[in-house]
Amino acid sequence: MKVALMGTRGAPALYGGFETAVEEIGSRLVQRGYDVTVYCRNPDQEITEFKGMTLVNLPAVKHRMAETLSHTALSTVHAITKDKPDVCLLLNAGNAPFLLPLKLAGIPTAIHLDGLESKREKWRGLGAKYYRWAERSAIKKGTLVISDAKAIANHVQEQYGRDTEVIAYGAAVINPPSDRLKDLNLEPGRYHLIVARLEPENHVLEAVHGYTQSQEDKPLIIVGSAPYSDWYIQKVKDAADQRTRLVGAIYDQELLDQLYAHAATYTHGHSVGGTNPSLLRAMGAGAPVLAFDCEFNREVTGNLALYWKDAEDYASLIGTNNFATMGERLQQRVANNYQWDAITDQYEALIKKLKASKK
């Protein structure tokens, strides 16, 4: 059976959760006998095969509002006219306009909603209006709709009266060495970590304000950037003190794994996503977690983390040592609930359901 995966930056996974999911699920589907095509917009990528998946590299307009849509438009045309898959997995509710042409071409499509995109600061104004429309359209027109958390599924049921397929992201359980920490002049257990896009809904600024109010002597390492949020990044820099280090985006997976695994704490400020991949990676690496208090983060961590709502809360948590067995318990939660093989089982069942809907 031919399966197309589109709507992301594609594979290899260099950027975020969607891309990691595509690589992990797509490669496992190949091992199970599926013919998988991944549509990619990794700049200057020339390889056309990766882990058994066929990669189709297509361009995109470099603009915040147009990048994803322009790339998915080209991907849709290619899928309809050349690849002709049996089913399509379309990621990101913003790609809802392409559900109709795929349907008219006889390609049943499941759309993955991701988080509540209309609530992200970068989409305020016209962008937020578009994402509210896109969410409604995706839920109405998708052959199947995927939520990555029960809280997202509950939102869809309450707002639109439609059931969704609840399939989370996954993460590896890892215990890596610490030899790469010297690249950043760090020692195991002697730093706090944030890994996030520097955008308002991820509450990095509040965490920095809280950290600077604390007496904690371990440095706060902030990994991440954001292509269209220079103003917010500057606010974070202005709020930081000499104990805070913004190191930018890191795409070296070995180094990232070691950063997660050997952090004194991992801070997760995301508030509008579902099952966040960065949070899962930190949990899988055994990091104690300080999570922004929202239903998504409590669902993923199983109420095993410590939670904060503002800078004052954060300041009271960051300097404590109440982390004894937290990392081990969170790591076990990943082992029990968020493994890629089991998640691929769910996607395989969904693909068969999509294929059957065509009959």
Image: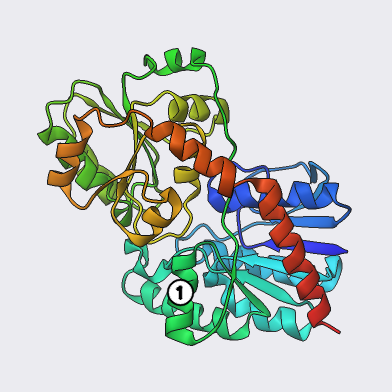
Up-down: is 124 above or below 291? below
Up-down: is 331 above or below 87? above
Q: Residue at x 82, y 82 (%)?
A: 358
Up-down: is 328 above or below 20? above
Q: Quadrant of the N terminus?
A: bottom right
Name the one closer to the observer, 76 or 112. 112
Exactly how many numbered labels are in the figure? 1
Q: Is residue 240 visible?
A: yes
Q: Position of residue 71 (x, y in %)?
A: 62, 63
Name the one closer to the observer, 286 or 41. 286
Describe residue 110's horizontal placement relative to residue 16 as left or right.
right
Describe residue 186's horizontal placement relative to residue 62 as left or right.
left
Q: Position of residue 23 (x, y in %)?
A: 68, 47
Bin the neighbour count of mark 1 within 10 Å (Cα to Cα): few under 14, some 14-19, many 20 and up. some
Up-down: is 73 above or below 243? below
Q: Position of residue 326 (x, y in %)?
A: 38, 35
Name the residue carrying label 1.
154
Q: Residue at x 76, y 86 (%)?
A: 104
